């Protein structure tokens, strides 16, 4: 077994926590959790989604997503829309959700820019390419 400091799952978790720290600080300021932000971002940058698609795109378990959708709906940040299939319901971002998205996306851009400047643009692109490739390989196993 690999030494602890070379264990991929732990290395990924450490990197995740370190990179999320400045985002969490900004999200706290606007009253969103990291998971809520992922939902807002996916809806803002895409089209209305059903819960199954949203859970997959946001990397959330369906029970967690259900709670998040309830909270975001109650806060007026997302809204339900009818689907051509009456058995399914989709959600979309609301105007208030768009305002939150605009506020946070501007802050996020600065955080990304700072991180990329310190880490290096080329290294960041390589890392993202490698992570996407690893995801594809691991998913196909």
Image: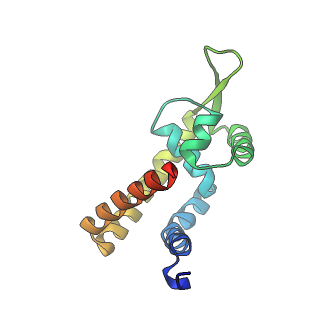
| Residue at the left extreme of this rendering | 122
Q: Residue at x 41, y 60 (%)?
A: 131
Q: Which of the colour schemes (rainbow, by chain, secondary structure, one colour) is used?
A: rainbow
The part of the image, by quadrant, that contains residue 66 is: top right
Q: Give 112 or 55, whichever is nearer the viewer.
A: 55
In x, y percent, where is residue 41?
A: 51, 45
Residue in the picture at 58% in, 44% down = 39
Left or right of residue 3: residue 80: right
Quadrant containing the N terminus in the rendered view: bottom right
Instruction: Give coordinates of residue 81: x percent, y percent.
Output: 63, 23
Q: Residue 51: x and y, percent?
A: 65, 35
Instruction: Name above or below for residue 57 compared with residue 106.
Output: above
Residue drawn at (49%, 39%) of the image = 44
Task: Left or right? Give the position of 19 relative to 1.
Answer: left
Q: Residue 133 or 96: which is nearer the viewer?
A: 133
Q: Residue at x 63, y 49 (%)?
A: 60
Residue 74 against residue 4 in the figure, above or below = above
Decide which of 46, 53 is in the foreground and name it: 53
Quarter where residue 34 is shown? bottom right
Residue 17 on image: x %, y % = 55, 71
Is residue 69 placed above or below 32 in the rendered structure? above
- Count of numbered circles in the view: 0
């Amino acid at each position: 077994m690999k030494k602890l400091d070379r264990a991929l799952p732990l290395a990924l978790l450490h990197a995740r926590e370190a990179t999320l720290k400045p985002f969490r600080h900004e999200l706290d300021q606007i009253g969103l959790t990291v998971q809520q932000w992922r939902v807002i971002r996916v809806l803002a940058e895409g089209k209305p989604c059903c819960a199954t698609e949203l859970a997959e795109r946001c990397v959330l378990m369906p029970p967690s997503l259900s709670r998040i959708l309830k909270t975001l709906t109650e806060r007026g940040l997302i809204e339900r829309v009818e689907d051509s299939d009456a058995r399914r319901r989709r959600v979309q971002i609301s105007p208030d959700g768009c305002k939150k998205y605009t506020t946070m996306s501007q802050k996020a851009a600065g955080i990304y820019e700072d991180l990329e400047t310190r880490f290096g643009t080329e290294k960041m692109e390589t890392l993202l390419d490698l992570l996407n490739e690893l995801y594809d390989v691991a998913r196909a196993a």
